[in-house]
Image: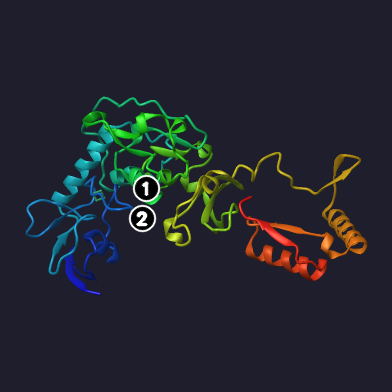
Amino acid sequence: MERVRLTIDGKEVITAAGNTILMAARQAHIAIPTLCYHPKLPISGACRACVVEVEGRPALVASCATPVAEGMVVHTRTERVLRARRLVAQLLLASGDHNCLTCQANGRCELQQLAYELGVEELEYSAEPPGYPKDTSNAMIERDLNRCILCGRCVRACNEVQVNEVIDYGYRGKRAKIVTAWDLPYGESNCVFCGECVSVCPTGALTETQAKFRGRPWVIRKVRTTCVYCGTGCQLDLNVVDGRVIKVTSDYRHGPPNYGSLCVKGRFGYDFIHHPDRLTKPLIREDGEFREASWEEAIGLVAKRLGEIKAKHGPQALAVLSSARCTNEENYLLQKFTRSVLGTNNIDHCARL
Ligand code: FES
């Protein structure tokens, strides 16, 4: 692999040819803020939060979109660079309604973090708030375009990662916003609610409805697990507050098979966990009515009845249906039980359910 040698903030960095200045800086543990950049998404270079100074170039360049070159000399924290980044932060803050008080993204918002890092205490510009009504047209994703910074991460996630092609930029100038086809609310659009847009949104413009007011980012404990819905084995994080799952996320750094992407079931189909109708105790039907039983009693009854059927009709009278929602180990045990204990090869599984 061809290597390139450059200098960033006086530090010599050797990186692969084709890498961007941002990638080289991060390799060397030199922090550069970003907003529209996301490692999982194609580069757009839209926000200019990541600008740096390159010796010999008259204008500041977007480090996320500029490839390294041999002998390049880069400065990431000159007064000129910081002034430009502050201007970006000021204009973005002025262009929307970024009241953090009850924002669901408070504590993980990348615009908030940028303003903090740059010491933006006073807003220098003011503009008429856009006044968009919140889109609460569905049960899963709340869309507040007043908090949208038009970074386009959701658009690239929808169109180029999930390839659902549901949202895009619409209108122009001051009226520019992210829209579905015919500017319909999410709930009336052809969105499939995979939530990829939510997972990459850097602000509180797209948030999980069910998690609203149920826990700030800093009280959430993440428990990594495998999705229970199908056999793909997507890796996800249960976001837990006070012992209850308030939302499901997935980190692209988890790697295969899903690299942070989920489907609607994996991301939003978790309310069964704490649902009051969920069966948590065995039930035995007697005279057409269910009654609660202990595990010992229930398992004893099943063993007795299976034994009776096998004795009377032979093992081929028995069949077992397993599930792709079980773990590999559970499915292995069930086929072992079916073949070795029941004495039949009648075992299958229901792939999707
Ligand atoms: Fe580089 Fe937006 S992060 S231009």
Judge from the rendering whether residue 180 lies leftward or rightward of residue 334; answer left or right: left
Cα–Cα span, label 2 and label 1:
8 Å
Q: Residue at x 41, y 49 (%)?
A: 162
Query: Which residue bears the numbered disc 1?
Result: 157
Residue 33 located left or right of residue 79: right
Figure check: 54 above or below 13: above
User: What is the x, y in percent for residue 199?
Assistant: 42, 47
Left or right of 166 on screen, residue 262: right
The picture places residue 169, in percent across and down from the top left corner, at 29, 37
Residue 128 position in % (x across, y down)? 26, 24
Above-or-below relation of 218 to 27: above
In the image, what residue type sits under mark 2?
Answer: Lys
- Residue nearer the viewer, 79 or 73: 73
Mark sitting earlier along the chain (2/1): 2
Q: Residue at x 36, y 43 (%)?
A: 154
Residue at the spot of label 2? 40
Q: How is the image coloured?
A: rainbow
Could you tell me which secondary element the residue under label 1 belongs to? helix
Mark 2 CB near ligand 1 (8 Å cut): no
Q: Nearer the viewer, residue 99 or 263?
A: 263
Mark 2 packing: few (<14 Cα in 10 Å), some, or many (20+)?
some
- Are the two marked residues, 2 and 1, in contact with CB atoms closer than 8 angstroms? yes
The percent coordinates of residue 48 (x first, y second) are 21, 47
**Is residue 10 shown to the viewer in this render?**
no
At x 45% / y 30%, what residue is drawn?
Answer: 188
Badge 1 density bin: few <14, some 14–19, many ≥20, Cα 10 Å? many
